[in-house]
Image: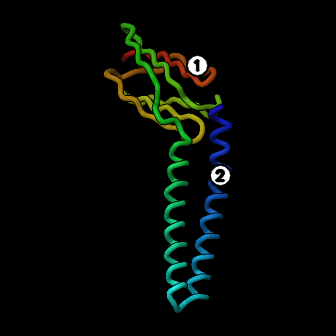
Amino acid sequence: MQASKDRRIHELRPMTVTLLVIVMLVMVILALRLQRGFIGIVLVVATAFILFYWMIEVRKMLKRSGLKDFIYEVLDEGDCISIIAQVPGPEDAVNVLTLGKRIIIKGGGGFKRTLVLPHKVELMHKSYKNGVLALKMQKL
């Protein structure tokens, strides 16, 4: 479901940019055509206000499209640490990189999160199924 939502958002971006360019062109044409007079000034100001309003709305819509919260759990199991996290797919886009105490998790749709652990770790096992990433790491 998340992959189809990400695909729809990526399809919306060119359309919104095109729409904003068209509105800006209309604003420029109105400014040039009605260069003088009160009505020309009112139309240009109204068009600028509408453009500004829609830019804010599109930005809000694009921000709401991704995962708001990164849901994860870290389990300390003696000499091992397990992490269970919700990560958007597809499976081939999910990547895990360990750098000392840092774990960098990448997923589909530009998803990237960094976790800092209390110990240096080495990745032993990784599995991903239905949007849930399970990691098992050994403490160093």
**In the rendering, at what x and y percent does residue 99 appear?**
41, 31
Mark 1: secondary structure? strand
Taking depth in this image into account, of 119 and 67 the one nearest to the observer is 67
**How many angstroms separate mark 1 from mark 2 (CA)?**
32 Å
Instruction: Determine the residue located farthest toward the left in the rendered image.
Output: 118
Residue pointed to by mark 2: 12
Taking depth in this image into account, of 33 and 119 the one nearest to the observer is 33
Q: In this image, 41 relative to 130: left or right?
A: left
Q: Which mark is residue 96?
A: none
Amino acid type, callout 1: Ser
Local packing at callout 2 (Cα closer than 10 Å; few below 14, some 14-19, many 20+) is: some
Amino acid type, callout 2: Leu
Q: Where's the C terminus, which quadrant?
A: top left
**In the rendering, at what x and y percent does residue 138 appear?**
42, 15
Residue pointed to by mark 1: 127
Q: In this view, does 111 lie above or below 103?
A: below
Report the residue at 54% width, 78% height from top: 43
Mark with earlier residue (1, 2):
2
Local packing at callout 1 (Cα closer than 10 Å; few below 14, some 14-19, many 20+) is: few
Mark 2: secondary structure? helix
Q: Is residue 12 above or below residue 104?
A: below
